[in-house]
């Protein structure tokens, strides 16, 4: 009975995913609907979710007391990046995929999927830890991650030029790894929502009731839209066309086994609250971050490779997320 009670949040998420899958099968939803839901979540629902949840759950003193905890996700993600460098060499990942492999290895879908999942499983008190993880990851991805993608794109351009081909990558590969575009990507809508919430809390500012009510209604869309999106994505993926390679298998293991194992190791060495430990491990175990696919296109890297692994890991997350939750909730790891 305790197990079923603990898994109630997981069951609710799986039910909504099944609904999204079923409605797509019946023709109500399609890939365009999935893209719309994704944009609504990232551009509207999550920013308001940040504002509503943080201002409701935390006061100024609470926020200041956990601010130093940003060091933990920084250590976890840095360790994951270094581990990814070593694994990519040991696994013999082709040079043409090194940038994308490493970016997918150390980053996860900590915002779009991570926020609603963490809140559903651990409650809104877990959200600040998820925000910190997302903030650090976003900064690292659009700096060292983007740098690796730019190098991969430059190699692809050079290879195409040597072969006398123009794959349409030249302009993209020339994009700088650091600059105004990088800053624009770091300052995403969810991050803006979190910064607004933090400013309201630190300034002890109370919004008018009509605004808080409106924000709450918009924020309530987050979890249903994300779960419906996952159902759509699972239905639309044509796995029969995928030909698995060794580096793909290693990357999947990296996302769901190695990265969370690194998070467990770091949080074992650095004393942290139990709730924070669970959140950090769950965020590290999320599927491939969708922004990697966007950045791969910008820098001329292997965007198709990223898209395939994003789809596969998103599907597998329907199993791995409940599995990691059970391991954490019952103290098995």
Image: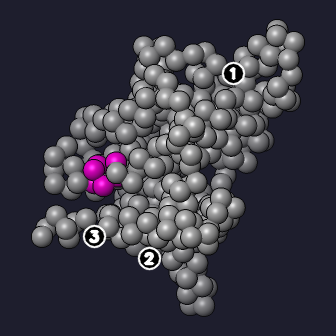
Chosen colour scheme: one colour
Closer mark to the observer between disc 2 and disc 1: 1
Q: Which mark is residue 151?
A: 1
Label 1 Cα crowd, 10 Å radius (few <14 / some 14-19 / many 20+): many
Between 11 and 265, the one lying in front of the other is 11
Q: Which residues are magenta?
A: 320-325
Q: Earlier in the sequence, mark 1 or mark 3?
A: 3
Task: Identify which residue is drawn at 51% across, 54% down.
Answer: 234
Label 3 Cα crowd, 10 Å radius (few <14 / some 14-19 / many 20+): few
Label 2 Cα crowd, 10 Å radius (few <14 / some 14-19 / many 20+): some
Tell me the SS state at disc 3.
helix
Q: Is residue 304 left or right of residue 233?
A: right
| Residue position marked by numbered label 2 in the rendering | 56
Between 45 and 247, the one lying in front of the other is 247
Residue 151: give x, y in percent of width and height: 69, 21
| Residue position marked by numbered label 3 in the rendering | 8
Residue 233: give x, y in percent of width and height: 55, 55
Is the residue 147 above or below the residue 329 in the image? above
Q: Which mark is residue 298?
A: none
Q: Earlier in the sequence, mark 3 or mark 2?
A: 3
């Amino acid at each position: 009975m305790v197990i079923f009670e603990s898994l109630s949040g997981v069951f609710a998420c799986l039910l909504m995913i099944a609904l999204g899958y079923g409605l797509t099968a019946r023709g109500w939803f399609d890939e365009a609907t999935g893209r719309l839901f994704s944009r609504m979540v990232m551009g509207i629902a999550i920013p308001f979710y940040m504002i509503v949840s943080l201002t409701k759950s935390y006061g100024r003193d609470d926020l200041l007391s956990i601010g130093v905890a940003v060091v933990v996700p920084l250590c976890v993600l840095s360790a994951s990046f270094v581990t990814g460098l070593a694994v990519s060499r040991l696994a013999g990942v082709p040079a043409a995929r090194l940038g994308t492999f490493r970016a997918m290895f150390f980053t996860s879908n900590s915002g779009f999927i991570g926020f609603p999942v963490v809140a559903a499983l651990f409650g809104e008190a877990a959200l600040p830890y998820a925000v910190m993880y997302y903030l650090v990851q976003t900064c690292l991805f659009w700096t060292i991650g983007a740098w690796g993608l730019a190098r991969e794109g430059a190699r692809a351009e050079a290879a195409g030029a040597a072969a006398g081909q123009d794959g349409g990558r030249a302009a993209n590969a020339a994009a700088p790894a650091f600059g105004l575009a990088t800053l624009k990507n770091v300052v995403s809508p969810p991050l803006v929502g979190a910064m607004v919430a933090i400013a309201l809390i630190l300034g002890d500012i109370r919004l008018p009731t009509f605004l808080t009510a409106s924000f709450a209604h918009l924020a309530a869309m987050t979890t249903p839209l994300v779960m419906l999106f996952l159902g759509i994505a699972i239905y639309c993926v044509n796995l029969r066309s995928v030909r698995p390679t060794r580096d793909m298998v290693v990357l999947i293991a990296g996302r769901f086994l190695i990265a969370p194992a690194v998070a467990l190791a770091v949080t074992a060495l650095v004393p942290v609250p139990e709730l924070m430990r669970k959140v950090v491990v769950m965020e590290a175990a999320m599927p491939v971050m969708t922004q990697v696919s966007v950045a791969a296109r910008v820098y001329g890297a292997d965007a198709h490779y990223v898209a395939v692994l994003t789809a596969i890991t998103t599907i597998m997350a329907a199993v791995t997320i409940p599995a990691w939750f059970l391991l954490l909730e019952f103290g098995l790891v």
